Image (spheres, rainbow, N blue to C red):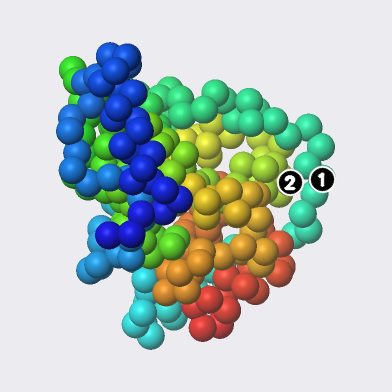
Amino acid sequence: MRLRGGAASAAVMLGMVLVLTGCENVDLPVDSEPSGSVPATGSGRGTSPLDNPDGTKPGLAPLTSDADRAEARVLIEKVATKGRGPRTGYERDEFGYAWMDTADGVPLARNGCDTRNDLIRRDGQNLRYRTGSDCVVIAMTLDDPYTGTTIKWRKQQAAEVQIDHVVPLSYSWQMGSSRWPESKREQLANDVLNLMPVEGRANSAKGDSGPASWLPPDKQIRCAYAVRFAQVALKYGLAVTAPDKAMMLKQCGG
């Protein structure tokens, strides 16, 4: 298996450091699978967004049948459009502190585990937990829907997997969430419907883009991504820009 960015040599060096210093993370189980990404084999754990309206099931699955794509277009057509406003005043803290477990009104809130680990547990496979914890994941395998790769992830390379806000928080701010009560913004930031563990580089490339400016690299998943974007917008009463809506429809054959 070819590893990304010298991950194999980095893993060897990390192991030597831990042996020599006896420092933190000594409770990490031995894992013969080094971190990195390989092409996905099989269908992974993705769930059709049409069958997952609350986001509690893992991942995204492509929408390939004519019937599903027609249903997707009907849903996307319900999303309102308007122009994108200014980013003035946007701060991440306006949506509560990151990965809070206390955002009421969304699935998995107040379960004793922060939102990031909830999402890793939802979508990851072969989970390994910190000693004494049934919450903090320190290693897993992720079938990334955005790139179509399988990522062997360990906590030392935390940025390899990031949690994407499907509707970016900054985008929502420009589309009207700046006028919401903070409690509703906290819901959007921690709602599993709006959250997806994905390859870190893909998430960084997306930034706060809407679908007209950025789509997942894996073309097979783009209609499902457009549906999830629409589901979040409809749940929270958010509009999207006209170019974004047109691109969403195009991904599903519209």
What is the tally of numbered marks visible in this picture? Answer: 2
Disc 1, disc 2: CB below 8 Å? Answer: yes
Amino acid type at circle 2 is Gln
Q: Looking at the picture, how far across and down is residue 162, in whole percent?
A: 46, 43
Q: Is residue 51 visible in this depiction of the protein? A: no
Q: Provide the residue designation for mark 1.
A: 86
Q: Residue at x 71, y 69 (%)?
A: 243
Q: Provide the residue designation for mark 2.
A: 174
Amino acid type at circle 1 is Pro
Q: Residue at x 64, y 58 (%)?
A: 210
Q: Residue at x 38, y 27 (%)?
A: 114
Tag shown at residue 66: none
> Is 90 located above or below residue 149 in the figure?
above
Q: Looking at the picture, how far across and down is residue 10, in whole percent?
A: 38, 39
Q: Is residue 138 visible in this depiction of the protein? A: yes
- Quarter of the view holding residue 239: bottom right
Q: Looking at the picture, how far across and down is residue 101, in whole percent?
A: 40, 25
